Image (cartoon, helix red, strand yellow):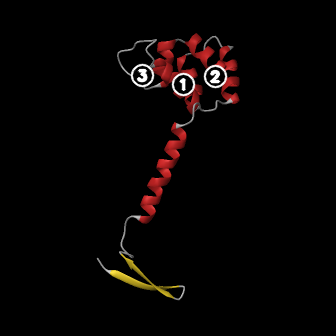
């Protein structure tokens, strides 16, 4: 390892390892990411969107609307998607496999339950 001496503000700064790659920016980015993750994990809920609720009311009037139509709307809202997947994976529905897609959750819960959940959540 080399020692680099540089003049900083009239004094000589001995900075071992200066000029070497690694550490500074990457470590700062990792700390920033960890701080953000801690804050997100402390949230008790994610806010819903009123626009999603309006779309659900509109699609509820369409008798030909199917699970794919609901999937498009729900997938546009991360909070609602999270809530729906959480419910689908709860012990209440006792599925053997983990539900990982919104469309799977819609088919498992049924459109009426999904509509009720979505409108009450938003």
Of callouts 2 and 1, the N-terminal one? 1
Q: Is residue 23 left or right of residue 121?
A: left
Residue 16 is situated, as x and y percent measured from the top left of the image, at 36, 77
Res 83 label: 1
x 47%, y 59%: residue: 28
Mark pair 1, 3: CA separation: 12 Å
- Against 65, is 18 above or below? below
Q: Are marks 2 and 1 in contact (CB under 8 Å)?
A: yes
Judging by the rendered image, the residue that carries numbered circle 2 is: 121
Mark pair 3, 2: CA separation: 20 Å
How many numbered badges does the structure rendering display?
3
Q: Quadrant of residue 116?
A: top right
Residue 21 is situated, as x and y percent measured from the top left of the image, at 37, 69
Q: Which image quarter holds the N terminus?
A: bottom left
Q: Is residue 26 left or right of residue 73?
A: left
Residue 102 is situated, as x and y percent measured from the top left of the image, at 49, 24
**Residue occupying the far front of the picture:** 11
Of callouts 1 and 3, the N-terminal one? 1
- Against 108, is 86 above or below? below
Residue 7 is situated, as x and y percent measured from the top left of the image, at 48, 87
Q: Is residue 90 left or right of residue 49?
A: left
Mark pair 2, 1: CA separation: 9 Å
- The mark lying in front, picked from 3 and 2, is 2
């Amino acid at each position: 390892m080399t020692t680099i001496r540089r003049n900083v503000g009239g004094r000589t700064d001995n900075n071992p390892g200066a000029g070497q790659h690694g550490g500074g920016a990457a470590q700062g980015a990792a700390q920033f990411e960890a701080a953000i993750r801690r804050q997100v994990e402390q949230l008790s809920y994610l806010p819903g969107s009123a626009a999603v609720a309006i779309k659900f009311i509109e699609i509820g009037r369409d008798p030909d609307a199917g699970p794919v139509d609901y999937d498009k709307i729900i997938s546009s809202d991360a909070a609602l998607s999270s809530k729906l997947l959480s419910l689908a994976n709860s012990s209440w529905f006792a599925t053997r496999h983990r539900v990982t897609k919104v469309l799977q959750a819609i088919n498992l819960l049924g459109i009426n339950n999904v509509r009720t959940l979505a409108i009450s959540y938003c």
